[in-house]
Image (tube, grey):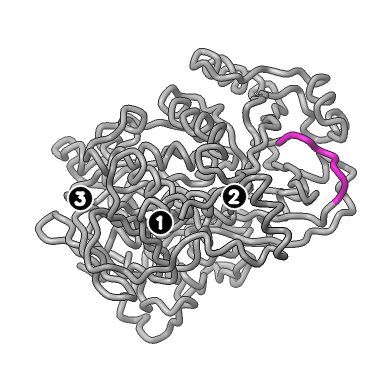
Amino acid sequence: MKKKYSITSLIKNSLSDNENWGKMWRNPNPKKHYDVIIVGGGGHGLGTAYYLAKHHGIKNIAVIEKGWLGSGNTGRNTTIIRSNYLWDESANLYDHAVKLWENLSEDLNYNMMFSQRGVLNLAHNEHDIKEIKRRVSANRLNGLDTMWLDKNEVKDLVPIMNTDNLRYPVLGAAYQPRGGVARHDAVAWGYAMRADELGVDIIQNCEVKGIKTDNYKVEGVETTKGFIKSSKIGVVASGHTSVLAATAGVRLPLQSRPLQALVSEPIKPVINTVVMSNAVHAYVSQSDKGELVIGAGTDGYNSFTQRGGYDVIEETVRAIVELYPIFGKMKMLRQWGGIVDICPDASPIISKCDVEGLYFNCGWGTGGFKATPGSANVFAHTIAKDEPHKINAPFALSRFSDGRLIDEHGAAAVAH
Amino acid sequence: MILIKCPYCGERDQSEFSNGGEAHVIRPKNPESLSDKDWGEYVFYRNNPKGIFYERWVHSHGCKKWFNAVRNTSTDQILRVYKVNEKRPDLSDFKNTLKSPSGEPLVGSGNFAVKK
């Protein structure tokens, strides 16, 4: 039954103490065979299943998730959305996502709490200014809404920022007003609910132990709930993608590292935009609950521990406190880490591979959340048609042998 | 944060060190005769196992010397530290010494060394 959320359904359900909302999706046992299996029940994976069912008419789909939906990096990121990437290929991909974000709540009839509150990228020295102005110009040529703001304009937007009295003064910033934040769990839940309505089986608490292939052709996946047959498998497992790929004999140019984030105790609204600084490594926004959401960096070594080192947080917090002296006495509530899969050029891989029927959507590194709808949309196209959409064609695995890299180290929020 | 035992200085905090990625990657002797794919493999592809990983470290804020380590990437436990001129320890040396928190195989399934 199609679930509708509206003002009337809110009133109706509030009269019965919100106890009759019902389940948002089924909890089916896996069938023996699916037309497409998506490994990974985060936003990208669930979105892929949704677009496959909605746009490409494939109904016999399973999404297999090791834990619960959105328990990986979908639930661990800092929810920032923007598309101010340097190169044409990336600008196309990320802005495709931003355009989908703008209508996602309506499309799924589920509130994404998408808030286009703008994103600032600070410049702290002459080189930053040149680099950021170059990126602003490149963005504008690609039709994006990025602009350069001088120090006073930045100060007007974020009055609590200390722009002058610090080791690396704030000299200006790139500003993208269409950027912002969204509720990360809602993305997974919204896609899951609508995919489920279209007949997609969402199988939680089921770990894919290996991908079975025969003579460079996929046969299915071995899971903790038995073997499931399929001729098309899309792997969207972020940090664990290379582990899964290896079971199919595929090697990927990925390195997995912990990336941390932390939130503070909730306070009254003080910052109504997203501020990022690549140079001093601090980025912060304020959630609707009032918590400061702070993104830290990656550890300097490969790890799958989902913790991260304390020195990484210390570095970020040091910069935050210098940029915003009023945060100096705040307490932090929680800290966590997620395992991100980093590509040599800091751009994702959305691609087929040497094994027929095996597709990868990985390598998003430290910045995959913003791309969720766009990535899912083009990945669904890639799986359904067995060829990439024109937006993700440049993000093929072949770029690591033909050399057409898309170097976005400068546009990534976190240096890596 | 982990402690690393530099073979020259002793046990120090990890923040004194820099990681140099996978160890024992050998530059091909005949780059001109390699295909683009093989050269790409050498330049961009590194093992990324969940489990036993051979890696390089440099004591950047100390003696500045490079050395190798064997670490379990699913626990961050360092199992062996050895100098660059020492022989690479055999994978079988590390059997039954590890427990992965998620109950996965002792040696990560992504470890290509196992498959060879």
Labelled pair 1, 2 in contact (Cβ < 8 Å): no
In the picture, measured across the screen, residue A400 lies left or right of residue B21, that is: left
Which numbered disc covers residue A357? 3
Inspect the image, locate mark 2, and give the three-letter code of the amino acid beneath it: His
Marks 1, 2 in one chain = yes
Which numbered disc covers residue B78? none
> Residue A279, how many percent across, how many down?
66, 35
Q: Chain of mark 3?
A: A
Q: Chain of mark 1?
A: A
- The residues colored magenta run A267-274
Q: Give the dominant element type of the magenta stretch: helix, strand or loop.
A: loop
Residue that appears at 50% across and 38% down:
A107
- Who comes first in sequence, dot 2 or dot 3? 2
Task: Answer above or below: position of A182 versus A265.
Answer: above
Task: Answer above or below: position of B100 versus A204.
Answer: below
Which numbered disc covers residue A237? 1
Q: Nearer the viewer, mark 1 or mark 2?
A: 2
Inspect the image, locate mark 3, and give the three-letter code of the amino acid beneath it: Gly
